[in-house]
Image (cartoon, helix red, strand yellow):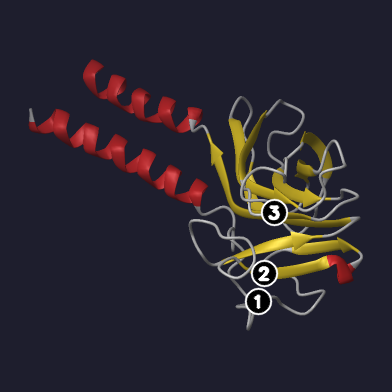
């Protein structure tokens, strides 16, 4: 009985470590640093741990309690036309694993069909953006009540194939022709290999 308990404990620890590593893959995922003084940062303020491409004047960090209220009540990033924000997660992808990116989005221009955009890239190194492997587009209706304060939960997934296994996963937002806001970015890999490892350990011990 004690041996079975020990095996299950080890398996649980393996799974716990893997899930902890996955949840920590993204840094500054809610865009809380650098801290904003007042309602809005100076134009071109790039969130810590993120990279910006495009017109830096179209990038701001906003205080949610003063601009667009949201449950965490802190900061979000506002991206203008042709501005993209990306981060290499440092996470090495594994074949067959599903990577799901979820986030909250708002927008200030209702006339564009796809006014919220997000992407995943596969990179050869942890400091590169890489090549596009998955994209996401949606329309967030800013006429929802209360106007200009409406946030929508979004998510999309990528199942890693043999071509991109062993490469680093990068996530990105923006690049639209409108102004949009993003917050609370979460990346969750389905830990298939970890689960199999834990189950394999248990099966091996039982056979012994």
Q: In which quarter of the image is the C terminus?
A: top left
> Badge 3 is on which residue?
148
Horizontal side of residue 118 vs 74, given as left or right: right
Decide: marks 3, 2 in contact (CB < 8 A)? no
For residue 176, the mark is none
Q: Say what secondary structure mark 2 lies in.
A: strand
- The alpha-carbon separation of the residues under discs 3 and 1 comes to 16 Å
In this rendering, the label closer to the viewer, 3 or 1: 3
Is residue 81 visible from the viewing direction of this image? yes
Is residue 47 visible from the viewing direction of this image? no
Q: Nearer the viewer, residue 91 or 183?
A: 183
Q: In the picture, residue 162 is in which quadrant?
A: top right
The percent position of residue 135, horizontal first and vertical second, equals 78, 35
Q: Say what secondary structure mark 1 lies in.
A: loop
Q: Badge 3: few (under 14), some or many (20 or more) residues near its Cα, within 10 Å?
A: some
Q: Which residue is drawn at 83% across and 39% down?
A: 132
The percent position of residue 149, horizontal first and vertical second, equals 64, 54
Q: Height in image: 59 above or below 194?
A: below
Horizontal side of residue 53 vs 19, given as left or right: right
The percent position of residue 27, horizontal first and vertical second, equals 59, 61
> Badge 1 is on which residue?
39
Q: Height in image: 165 above or below 171?
A: above
- The alpha-carbon separation of the residues under discs 3 and 2 comes to 14 Å
Q: Nearer the viewer, residue 4 or 51?
A: 51
Q: Quadrant of the N terminus?
A: top left
Pointer 1 or 2: first along the chain: 1
> Badge 2 is on which residue?
62
């Amino acid at each position: 009985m004690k041996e079975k308990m020990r095996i299950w404990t080890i398996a649980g620890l393996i799974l716990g470590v893997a899930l902890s590593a996955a949840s920590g893959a993204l840094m500054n995922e809610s865009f809380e640093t650098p801290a904003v003084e007042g309602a809005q940062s100076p134009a071109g303020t790039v969130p810590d741990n993120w990279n910006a491409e495009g017109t830096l004047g179209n990038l701001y960090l906003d205080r949610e309690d003063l601009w667009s209220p949201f449950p965490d009540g802190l900061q979000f990033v506002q991206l203008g036309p042709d501005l993209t924000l990306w981060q290499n997660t440092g996470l090495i992808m594994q074949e067959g694993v599903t990577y799901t990116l979820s986030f909250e989005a708002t927008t200030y221009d209702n006339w564009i069909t796809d006014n919220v955009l997000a992407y995943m890239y596969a990179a050869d190194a942890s400091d590169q953006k890489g090549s596009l492997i998955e994209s996401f587009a949606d329309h967030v209706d800013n006429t929802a009540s209360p106007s200009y304060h409406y946030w929508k939960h979004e998510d999309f997934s990528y199942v890693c194939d043999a071509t991109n296994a062993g490469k680093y996963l990068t996530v990105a937002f923006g690049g639209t022709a409108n102004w949009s806001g993003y917050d609370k970015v979460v990346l969750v890999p389905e830990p298939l290999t970890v689960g199999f490892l834990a189950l394999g350990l248990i099966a091996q011990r039982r056979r012994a």
